Image (spheres, rainbow, N blue to C red):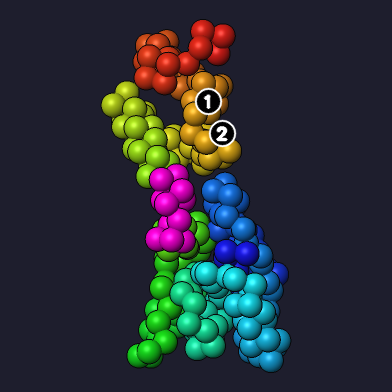
Amino acid sequence: MKVAIFMGSKSDSDTMKKAAEVLKEFGVEYKAYVISAHRAGDLLVKTIAQVEQAGTQVIIAGAGLSAALPGVIASRTVLPVIGVPLECINPGKSNGLAGMDALLSIVQMPPQIPVATVGINSAKNAAYLALQVLALQSPELKQKLIEFWELVEDYYNFFTENGLKPEDAREVLPLSIRTRLVQCGFHKAWNNFFNLRCATAAHPNAQAIAKKLKALFKAEEKFY
């Protein structure tokens, strides 16, 4: 196991699962735990020791409200801990602080107990940071990250150069392209652009864009 994902409540899983999805895309092993730092302190300490023994290299911890979980974990291990401040919404309503309480609780750690903190609800960024940490000891993972971000840059440049909104790119890339890029080793994934075509179909220059897509990605004729 490379990464351990902690959260204080099952209600945090909708946000924290986004970190798991990113790790899965890159083929990185992980395991998730739901443990309250306030209500199950002994179990938390025991579990931290277990994940260390299992060879975990990075810990991601998400918490809301007073958000003690990442800090408590950091005080019990020398492994790097990445904190994800979570907005508390229960049931269906915010507590009025919009996650700022958790953000300040996690980022304002005392000296000698650092927690690398990402933005509110930014579980994906926590996973990408974990990947970068792991890549320090894995040339293969480092190369995957380099290739991935080169493709991401090309993709976004294509959208902006053709007058498409950046949010269109954000909508398509995570849902349809990114997983195939990783699973296919960044090779044949570019050949199937069904979702890209759907995203651009309503654009006034749809046909011209389709031709540019074909030229840019060298897709086979059958996909068009």
Q: Residues within 10 Å of mark 2 (few under 14, many from 20)?
A: few
Q: Which residue is tagged 2?
A: 184
Identify the residue at horizontal 38%, vertical 89% (top origin): 112
Identify the residue at horizontal 42%, vertical 16% (top origin): 218
Secondary structure mostly taken by the magenta-highlighted segment of the chain: helix
Residue nearest the observer in this picture, 46 or 193: 46
Give residue 188's position: percent from left, percent from top: 53, 25
Please identify the quadrant where the N terminus is shown: bottom right
Please indicate, yes or no, whether residue 65 appears anywhere in the rendered image: no
Identify the residue at horizontal 48%, vertical 37% (top origin): 173
Q: In the picture shown, does residue 52 fall above or below 199?
A: below
Compared across the picture, whether 2 is left or right of 146 comes to right
The dot on residue 188 is 1
- Residue 138 sits inside the magenta stretch: yes
Which amino acid type corresponds to the residue marked 1 in the rendered image? Lys
View extreme (top): residue? 221
Where disc 1 sits, the SS reads helix
Q: In the picture shown, does residue 124 fall above or below 196?
A: below
Answer whether labels 1 and 2 touch (C-beta < 8 Å).
yes
Give residue 145's position: percent from left, percent from top: 42, 47
Compared across the picture, whether 104 is left or right of 75 comes to left
* C-alpha gap between disc 1 and disc 2: 6 Å
Compared across the picture, whether 14 is left or right of 68 comes to right
Span shown in magenta: 134-144
Identify the residue at horizontal 43%, vertical 61% (top origin): 137
Please indicate, yes or no, whether residue 140 appears anywhere in the rendered image: yes
Q: In the picture shown, does residue 191 fall above or below 67?
A: above
Where disc 2 sits, the SS reads loop
Give residue 109's position: percent from left, percent from top: 40, 86
Asked where in the image residue 175 lies, by quadrant, the reply is top right
Give residue 167's position: percent from left, percent from top: 42, 39
Which amino acid type corresponds to the residue marked 2 in the rendered image? Cys
